[in-house]
Image (tube, rainbow, N blue to C red):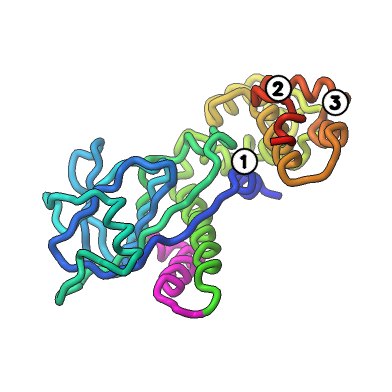
Amino acid sequence: MDVLSDILRTMHLRGSIYFGSCFCAPWGLDIEQGEKASFHIIERGQCWLRMDHLDEPVPLVGGDILILPHGSRHQISDQPDRPCQPGTPIVERIIANENPFEGQHENFKIICGYFKFKQDAQQPFFNALPDIIHLNQNDRQQFSWLDTALKLVVAEATSNKPGKSILMDRVTEVLFIQVIRAYIQLHHDDENFLAALNDKHISKALAVMHNQPDQPWTIETLANESGMSRSMFANRFHHLVGTTPMKYLLSCRMQLAKSQIEHGQASLYEIAEQVGYSSDSSFKKAFKRFFDRTPASYRKK
């Protein structure tokens, strides 16, 4: 199991498409801050992206993929200064086949959807994601697998074949993973958790913590796994991941334990052993400190 796969599995990634529609100018959507990450695929034409922290509107053209991992408020429109209508009621109308931007000259087509995940599950990963991930046609050409995922999303968004709904969910989840993979490779020099996944030393320590959380890891043994001295490893890990190795290990163990409680049938004693605790009492105390709830109460819930 690689680290990114384990993180995304823990986050319970889900995704789907709201709509794939053609618009006729003038049009503009003001999409408010939300709990879900939103995405837009520009299939044809051009539009403009505006956000409060952007100095200038950003042009988006056919073939572009835009993901807002933190669900940030933004505006997309046919012109950079176009007044925008509230997004939620417009999206509801489009889903109900009442597209208010229909017209005779629909030279713009867009696919809009969302990604949903438990943001509290992997804070270092989630915090490292930027407000905007914007990949263009040139970026897609570097990663053939990303282009394949995008084509699948576009095909299913315009399909009426049986199984469309469930398949749209799955291909959008694949798209998110592919975009994250591409982003990590394009920004391998960044100094954050995403860079840690590619770092030849720190990635080794992350891998053993995710793959073998039951082992009695220490700073020394993790440093040995990474091929670094104790002090260099601790400093480098904290710099990239944003927390200490032992706190990160605790998070891995607790997230695994929570998942086992939610979806498994193992006893609390068995779960304690799986996540590296020699007694269920010490496990219960650690779980209570981490989640502010006992394992038993969490299982009952």
Q: Which mark is residue 86?
A: none
Comparing 149 with 93, the one in front is: 93
Estimate the x, y position of residue 278 in percent, counting from the top left. 88, 25
Q: Give the mark nearer the N terminus: 3 vs 2.
A: 3
The quarter of the rendered structure image containing the C terminus is top right
**Disc 1 from disc 2: Cα separation:** 34 Å
Q: Which residue is denoted by mark 1 in the rendering? A: 200
Say whether residue 148 is magenta.
Answer: yes
Q: Give the mark nearer the N terminus: 1 vs 2.
A: 1
Number of callouts: 3
Q: Amino acid at mark 3?
A: Asp
Estimate the x, y position of residue 116 in percent, counting from the top left. 50, 48
Q: Residue at x 36, y 45 (%)?
A: 132
Q: Which mark is residue 288?
A: 2
- The residue tagged with tag 1: helix, strand or loop? loop
* Residue contact at pointers 3 and 1, CB within 8 angstroms: no
